[in-house]
Image (cartoon, grey):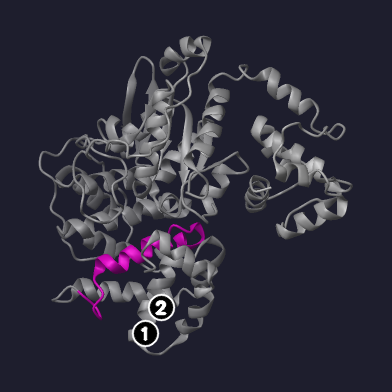
Amino acid sequence: MAYCEMANWYFIDSGFVEAITPYLKTPKVHFKTPVIMCLFYLVNESQSEIFKTDPSHLRYIIILLETSLKSEDGTARDWTPYRLVRGLAMLSSNDSNKRGILDAGILPSLVTMMNNGNTQEQKVAAHTIWVLSFDKVNKEMMAANQDVMDALMALTRNSSDHGVKKMAMGALWGCGIYQRHSSSKMGMHFKMMKSHEPSHVETSPKKKSPSPRPRSSLTKVKPLPPIAPSPSSSTHPPPFEDVRVGNPPPPAPPPAGAPPPAPPISDAQNDKLASSSTQTGHVMISYSWSNQKQVLEISEYIRKAGYKVWLDVDQIEGSTIEAMANAVENAHVVLVCMSQAYKDSPNSRAEAEYAYQLRKEVVPLKLQRNYRPDGWLGFVVGSRLFFDFSGKYTFESRIDGLMKELRRKYFPNSEQEDTADVVARVEGSKPPKEEGGSNSDNKITTWNTKDVIQWLNGLHLSSFDRSVTEGWTGLNLLYLKRIENKAPEFFYHYMAATLKLNLEDMMRLEDGLFIL
């Protein structure tokens, strides 16, 4: 059950990780292996010290992996190489574990898996190298390992499976073997780094022996031939399962009870939007395959509002890495669809970090309930305004806010007067009571300072400057709620800079205001 993205959060929140960690010391091998593998799937960035402080557990699994690769039936204690490496790949999504996994000696086994002709093993091995490459030291070490580079290059040239080609190309990208070059005159393409430019092109690839070499056996990288473009397909197939090859099917028709059409925009904005796809850029949606249903619904709504949307389901061309880079470079806004699967995906990380590097307008969407971004994803989204499409709220209540945010990104002056009016008065006198407010609003207007303190205490905020809210009454809370609706960018800046809330506390305060 720990393999399931939706289920693992229940294990984490229930304290399951803390409960089974002591069993790592058990001498019973048949019990120790599933405990380690289960933890591989469950530990997050804050819990990753379990394997960093005691690397013997990593070495134990890698020895098991080496045994399975040499055995006649392809298993070791009923564990296949695929299952063992898949667990190591999940653990390596935590940045603090990446170097330890490489230091434990995983590379020779990954090379063997890439060379043995098993598509499933090739895919998970190349995927693991891609994930490990996000550590700078790992990146340099793997790029200097001739066996690793030869195996990856052979997969990009010879594999008939698009998923394998995609993972291999991504691993080469992650290892820095290819640089991205763009120019309005030159067009979009890839060029090899000078240190890896080929002196000739081989007509037939060299056959490599599948037997592994010691990890310490690093050799100087030979010139590499260019990679042929891979066939058109989706950027986000399931990371390991060999179930989708080629182009995905078209989106299903909207179900009964689907949300209403997107609200119309003004004539002036419509004229401007008609040319924005070429002048300003499209809306790129960066997401994990497991969230495709939610993403298609959001995408359709945005398209109907007149925006050009880049979604890998129907616009992938050429190699997936080139398509990703092209999509990010030509985007005006990048929607980052947050979930555990997104955080664990090297393809998603490449997209999000490239958008961050190019200083694109990043708008986070939360697609998994109870998910809290950490590690690299927490760094990329920071304290940005995010929209919760996890199912906690109705689709209609969230999509309206997202559409307003897109209009602000594309037309920053369109709501200047309304927003400026709210911002100018945010720290002024207490607002008057709104006419026609709900019964709940009328009740909150009677709250005194003690009631507000009690309400704030109930949110369990850990990073909160209480001096800012001294003397607040219910009127202040209602006004803060109005600011969230009318000027969300200022609202989130106010929470981070003035109230000094971290990302988790921002989520709690936003949820509290929503039900207020």
- Image label count: 2
Which amino acid type is shown beneath numbered disc 1?
A: Phe
Residue 447 x, y percent position in the rendering = 83, 49
What amino acid type is highlighted by mark number 2?
A: Val
Which residue in the protein does label 1 denote?
31
Q: Residue at x 43, y 31 (%)?
A: 260
Q: Would you say residue 193 sits in the magenta stretch?
A: no
Q: Is residue 223 visible?
A: yes
Start-end of magenta stretch = 75-99
Query: Considering the numbered disc 1 on the image, is that residue within a helix, a strand or a loop?
Result: helix
Residue located farthest toward the bottom when viewing the structure as drawn: 27
Label 2–label 1 contact, CB within 8 A: yes
Q: Nearer the viewer, residue 241 or 457?
A: 457
Point out residue 178 in the picture as x, y percentages from the top left corner.
34, 37
Q: Main secondary structure of the magenta part?
A: helix
Mark 2 and mark 1: Cα distance apart in space: 7 Å
Judging depth in this view, the residue of 162 and 499 nearest the camera is 499
Q: Quadrant of the N terminus?
A: bottom left
The mark found on residue 35 in the picture is 2
Q: Residues within 10 Å of mark 2 (few under 14, many from 20)?
A: some
Position of residue 475 relative to residue 459, above or below, is above
Q: Nearer the viewer, residue 15 or 38?
A: 15
The quadrant in which residue 303 appears is: top left
Q: State the residue at coordinates (51%, 60%).
A: 96
